[in-house]
Image (cartoon, rainbow, N blue to C red):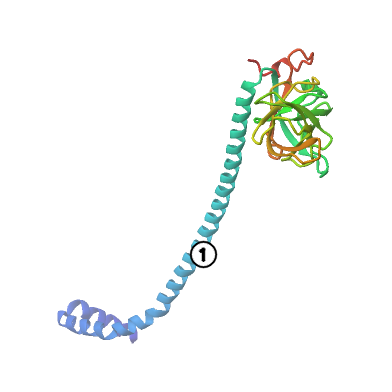
Amino acid sequence: MIVVLAMALIWLDSHAPWLQPVRQVNGYLILPAQKVAAIPATMANWFGESAATHQELLNQNKKLTARNLILETKAQRLASLEAENIELRELLSASEQVDDRVLVTSLTAVDPDPFSQQILIDKGVEDGVFIGQPVLDAFGLLGQVIDVLPRSSRVLMIADPNHAIPVQVNRNGVRAIAAGTGSLDVLELIYVPNTADIEVGDLLVSSGLGGRYPKGYPVATVTSVENISGKSFATVTAQPSAHLDRSRHLLLVFQQGSGQVPPEALWNKK
C-alpha cells in the first residue's frame, strides 16, 4: 500500500505542475529540520579536520625543530672551521717568514698535570722529528721536542717551570734568560741586573745562544719591570708571544746546517 502511494505521489509530482508551489513551501518548512539533522555529521567532520590539522601541525613542528637543530649544528661547525682556517692562514704567513725549513703538525693532546706544560703532536720519527727540535706557532716560539715516537712527539712548552730559553731585547740586544713559571701567560726573566735597559713593551726574541733555538724568533713581550732597592737583580715578567693555550696547528723547524733531514715531500720549500 505504501509503495503504491509513493508511486502515485511520484507520478503526480511529475505530471501535475500545480504542485510546484506546494513543494517549495514544504521545502522552507522542513529546512530547519534538515539543518538540525545535519549537525552531527557537520560536527564530526569539523572535529576530524581539526584533529588532522593539529596532528599535521605537530608533525611539521617536529620536522622544523629537527631541521633547526641540524642547521645550528652545521653553523657551529662552520664557525669552528672558519677559526681553523684563520689559524692555518696565520700559520702559513708565519712559515713564509721563517728562513729554515718547516713541517706543519697538529696538537693531539695536552698533559693534564697542572705543574707541567707539555703537549703531544701528531708527527714523529717517521716524519723526521728529533729531540730538541724547535716548535713554533703563528706568533712565536712555543717550545721544543723532548720525546719522539714513530708517529707522535712530546713538546715541552716555554711556560713549563723546567724550561728556560736565552733571549735578547729586540730594541737594543740586551741578553737575558726567560724561564717558565708554570703559567701559560707569564715568563720570568732571571738574573737581570737593575741597570739593564729593559722596558715594558720590549719584544724579546731568541738569541740563538746555546744552539737549541734559531735566532730572531719572537718569544715574549715584557709586561713588568720592578727594581727593588737593596737587590742586585730586577724582577721582570713577560707574556709569551705564542698562543700557548689555544694554538692547534704548529710548525716544526728544521734549522739549516743542523744535519736533520725530514722526508723530502714534507718540506716547506721556499
Write down the residue under mark 1: 55
Residue 152, image quadrant? top right
Q: Considering only vertical position in the picture, is 128 above or below 48?
A: above
Q: Residue furthest front?
A: 230
Q: Is residue 119 visible?
A: no
Which picture quadrant has residue 91?
A: top right
How many C-alpha atoms fall within 10 Å of the one at disc 1: few (<14), some, or many (≥20)? few
Residue located 62% across and 30% down the image:
88
Q: Position of residue 57 (x, y in %)?
A: 49, 62
Q: Quadrant of the N terminus?
A: bottom left
Q: How many marks?
A: 1
Horizontally, residue 248 falls left or right of residue 177, namely left
Q: Amino acid at mark 1?
A: Gln
Q: Position of residue 181 (x, y in %)?
A: 79, 40
- In the image, 187 versus 250, the foreground residue is 187
Residue at the farthest left position: 18
Residue 225's image quarter? top right
Q: Position of residue 142 (x, y in %)?
A: 73, 31
Rendered residue at 76%/25% (across/down): 134
Q: Nearer the viewer, residue 84 or 70?
A: 84
